[in-house]
Amino acid sequence: MFEKKGSYLKLFLLLAIITIFNLSLQAQTFEAIKNQVKVHTLKNGMKFIVLERHEAPVVSFHVYADVGSANESYGITGISHLLEHMAFKGSKAIGTKDYEAEAKILKELDDLYDQIKREKVKPKPDTNKIKEMEEKFEALRKKAKEYVINNEYFDMMMREGDRGVNAYTSNDATQYINSLPSNKLEFWMAMTSDRFLNPIFREFFKERDVVMEERRLGLETRPMGRLIEDFLAVAFKAHPYHHSVIGHMSDLEHITRKDVEQYFRKFYGPSNLTVGIVGDVKTQEVFDIAEVYFERIPSGPKPEFVRTVEPEQGGERRVTVVAKAQPLIIVGYHRPDARHKDSTSLEALANILGQGRSSRLYQLLVKEKKVAVAVIAINGFPGEKFPNLIAFYAVPSRGHTSAECLELIDEEIEKIQKESVTAEELTKFKRSAVKSIMNQMKSNSRMAALLTYAEVVLGGLDEAFEQIKEIEAITAEDVKRVANEYLAKKKRTIGELVYGK
């Protein structure tokens, strides 16, 4: 009996030593990669980060625009995402058969749309006049369409070997992604600089309709989407994390092409753009070509940082959505931004509590008590650049309730608050976290994303390479401390989807 316990102890100590050794080796690898990363800031403020990798003749490009839905104000929510859609519509040279002729029609469309809006908001709008103007508007849209070369940007990129044209908008940022053969470096520079120097937001009203349909399908007709939107609106009463990336329907209905142009000029200046390039390139060549193509873009001041700070929450908040759907519950606790010293400890807490089948909440709620069919912890929701949430999501199983799930979630949180986590749990988290980071760094595209994220959100490239040290330094006491500090009931919001008519 005692010999068996001693064997288990020796085995655990051996695994701990191996883990520490591996972490040390990986830290050395981090340092080697860090020394290869080079940065160059153009005269107009645009920043290029380059990491050479010559294993294969390919290169990944990641443009990080430091603007997301958190930068939006009332009346234009959803405009960051809409602009992302419009960014693929081309320029004065791409996507058009005759830009000069097209530009005249686009101006007519803008002016006529303004007239229609003004007439509609009058106390007694002239319906006949509105109908006449709308018919003329549709005729102009068809005329403008005659000058458009559909998807020319995509077609040109794909002909040159880009199978990874992509973009996405979050609460924190808008990001544009390409992957090309390495001999297409200058082609990418020419195409991308043209998009940021001479963007033309053609087919605006068509694309706006597409985004509005995305909202209908993704939020308005999906109970889960409605719950998350209402949950965030209650959890954040002041900070712009309170509205969704897709925006409010009434805002989408009234955003104009002029709004998008103004928003682009404000947030897409060179000083607000960071480019990560990872792959089979020569660093100095990248910097030299970047100066030729991107220094053409006029400089401007970096946009003002978001002013609003979410005030401290003084008590538990609740929101309920009733729908004919599977019940579920979301519990979110306020936490600081990604740069805060407690971020890594909070990541460990979320992982141990509710990430993966071996997590405490999965084992308790799904495997042992069988009160839930799914449970997960999310750290950094809905964004990370500003103070955000650590959240827990559970779907009750048949015959059980959200209240039962919440009770067990609370019990498990209280255990950590009183007893902390075990050495085995912490070691497992550290091992999986380091593996995840190393896997991210193996991919050119994901590495480019990491470098731009570290530079913009974490405050510097060094932060991307300090992660292993931060993970190594976490103790069980750190996890217990953050559980007590941040998982307080008065700091939480509970969202519940309840079955009903």
Image (cartoon, rainbow, N blue to C red):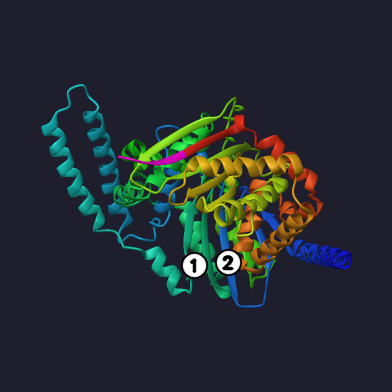
Question: Where does residue 374 sit, x and y in percent of width and height?
Answer: 51, 54
Name the spot of residue 277 as percent of width and height, x first. Answer: 62, 63
Outermost residue, top side: 123
Q: Which residues are magenta?
A: 496-501
Compared across the picture, whether 272 is left or right of 127 comes to: right
Residue 454 seen by the camera: no
Viewport quadrant of the C terminus: top left
Q: Three-letter amino acid code at disc 1?
A: Gly
**Do the residues bearing badges 1 and 2 touch, measured as CB atoms within 8 Å?**
yes
The prevailing secondary structure element of the residues shown in magenta is strand
Q: Is residue 6 left or right of residue 327?
A: right
Residue sticking out furthest to the left: 128
Picture residue at 67% right of the left edge, 70% below the top: 282
Q: Residues within 10 Å of mark 1 (few under 14, many from 20)?
A: some
Q: Is residue 332 left or right of residue 466?
A: left
Q: Amino acid at mark 2?
A: Ser
Q: Quadrant of the N terminus?
A: bottom right
Q: Is residue 153 left or right of residue 7?
A: left
Q: Vertically, is 79 above or below 274?
A: above
Tell me if mark 2 has few (under 14), some (14-19) or many (20+) residues whose alpha carbon lies within 10 angstroms of its own. many
Residue at the spot x=17%, y=38% of the render? 133
In the picture of the structure, the residue carrying the numbered disc 2 is 60
The answer to which image quadrant residue 38 occupies is bottom right
Residue denoted by label 1 = 164
